[in-house]
Image (tube, helix red, strand yellow):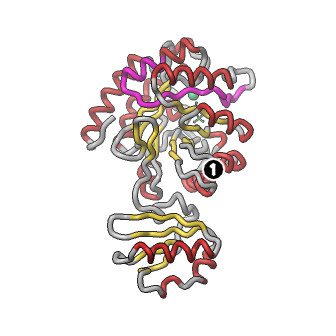
């Protein structure tokens, strides 16, 4: 439920409502807008109704949240969520470039990728240490050793790192190293893991499940937020359709839809979305034009030698050219990189 305070409501009147809600065993989320305060009550709607808050002169109205997702919804919080990560902000006027190899393979490979993407303008380094591979015979990632390499390269370059966690048992370990924890497409509905991530105070990059509807995706985000971690970044990475020419079908319409439905930032991954480096620049430009808060792009110093996803990885040269184009596009949109 949402309690909309009168524009003239005083601080102690807001406090009165907050205390009543808390005493009734409800969670409270305060949103202080320019003109009025909106209080989100989390929990059983009947408990909120029983308080009869509408009768108070400083309460304008009490409304149910119509969407099945609550904390995630724009009804609950009208302003965009903005998260600070290192020197950059996600969800505001900055266009974020997360770039790096699909998998961490060696210090040499990771450092070359990191230095290359940093020089090109990327603000965040990506790299998987735990890799969810379709085949059990494919390279599975360097695991903890990969996390250590990411930390070493962060120290050398200053780039914050985003890396994937694959199960609830390694959440603590990955959280020790990562600046942003990635939930891969295959794990979007791993509810035990989402609950564990909800206990952290760290940004989570939540990829859309490969066959998930937007509502299912946002309900997964709700799991994390319901646990108390409100730093959720959504990531559209393509969904399964009848089309096989591209690896997935990148659903760019999801960008304005989630911007309409939620206050959370949204990033687009055109590498997994298309599966082919040739199409990555066009879809990156389209993503930024559609209003995405950034892109996540796979970049490898030698894509032909990559142990994972070489076919969709840009070279450092190609990423540098793309970054320039995105900076120009961002400027047209009143944003910056
Ligand atoms: C990845 O980003 O390396 C990855 C495995 O992505 P997804 O979960 O979207 O397939
Ligand atoms: Mn990959």
Characterize the local packing of mark 1: few (<14), some (14-19) or many (20 or more) Cα atoms within 10 angstroms: many
Instruction: Pinpoint residue 68: horizontal percent, then vertical percent.
Output: 58, 64
Instruction: Pinpoint residue 93: horizontal percent, then vertical percent.
Output: 33, 44
Mark 1 element type: helix
Question: What is the quadrant of residue 284 in the picture?
Answer: top left
**Measured along the vertical axis of the image, is residue 58 above or below residue 176?**
below
Taking the image as shown, residue 9 lies to the left or right of residue 308, namely left
Q: Which residues are magenta?
A: 113-135
The residue that appears at 51% across and 68% down in the rendered structure is 40
The residue that appears at 58% across and 37% down in the rendered structure is 182
Instruction: Pinpoint residue 239: horizontal percent, then vertical percent.
Output: 56, 42
Taking the image as shown, residue 85 lies to the left or right of residue 242, namely left
Q: Where the C terminus falls, by quadrant?
A: top left
The quadrant of the picture showing ligand 2 is top right
Q: Nearer the viewer, residue 287 or 141?
A: 141
**Measured along the vertical axis of the image, is residue 73 above or below residue 224?**
below
Q: Where the N terminus falls, by quadrant?
A: bottom right
Q: Which residue is mark 1?
A: 198
Q: Nearer the viewer, residue 235 or 33?
A: 33
**Measured along the vertical axis of the image, is residue 128 above or below residue 197?**
above
Instruction: Pinpoint residue 38: horizontal percent, then vertical percent.
Output: 44, 69
The residue that appears at 64% across and 34% down in the rendered structure is 174
**Measured along the vertical axis of the image, is residue 171 above or below residue 72?**
above
Q: Residue furthest bottom?
A: 55
Taking the image as shown, residue 179 lies to the left or right of residue 292, namely right
The residue that appears at 46% across and 27% down in the rendered structure is 159
Q: How many marks?
A: 1
Would residue 216 be counted in the magenta stretch?
Answer: no
Q: Nearer the viewer, residue 274 or 328?
A: 328
Q: Nearer the viewer, residue 157 or 330?
A: 157
């Amino acid at each position: 439920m949402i309690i909309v305070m009168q524009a003239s409501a005083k601080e102690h009147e807001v406090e009165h409502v907050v205390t009543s809600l808390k005493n009734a065993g409800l969670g409270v989320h305060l949103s202080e807008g320019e003109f009025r305060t909106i209080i989100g009550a989390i929990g059983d709607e009947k408990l909120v109704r029983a308080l009869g808050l509408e009768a108070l002169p400083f309460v304008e109205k009490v409304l149910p949240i119509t969407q099945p997702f609550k904390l995630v919804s724009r009804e609950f919080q009208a302003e965009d969520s903005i998260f600070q990560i290192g020197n950059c902000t996600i969800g505001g006027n900055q266009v974020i470039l997360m770039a790096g190899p699909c998998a961490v393979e060696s210090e040499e490979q990771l450092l070359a990728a990191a230095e290359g993407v940093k020089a090109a303008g990327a603000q965040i380094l990506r790299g998987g240490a735990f890799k969810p591979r379709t085949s059990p015979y494919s390279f599975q990632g360097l695991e903890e050793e990969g996390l250590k390499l990411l930390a070493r390269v962060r120290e050398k370059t200053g780039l914050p790192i985003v890396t994937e966690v694959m199960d609830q048992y390694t959440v603590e370990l990955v959280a020790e190293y990562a600046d942003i924890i990635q939930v891969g497409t295959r794990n979007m509905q791993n509810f035990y893991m989402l609950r564990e991530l909800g206990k952290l105070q760290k940004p989570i990059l939540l990829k859309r499940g490969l066959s998930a509807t937007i509502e299912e995706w946002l309900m997964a985000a709700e799991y994390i937020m319901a646990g108390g971690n409100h730093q959720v970044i959504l990531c559209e990475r393509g969904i399964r359709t009848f089309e096989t020419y591209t690896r997935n079908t990148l659903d760019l319409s999801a960008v304005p839809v989630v911007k309409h439905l939620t206050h959370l930032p949204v990033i687009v991954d055109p590498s997994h979305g298309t599966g082919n480096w040739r199409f990555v620049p066009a879809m990156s430009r389209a993503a930024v034009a559609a209003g995405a808060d950034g892109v996540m792009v796979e970049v490898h110093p030698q894509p032909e030698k990559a142990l994972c996803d070489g076919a969709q990885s840009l070279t450092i040269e190609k990423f540098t050219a793309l970054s320039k184009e995105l900076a120009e596009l961002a400027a047209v949109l009143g944003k910056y990189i």
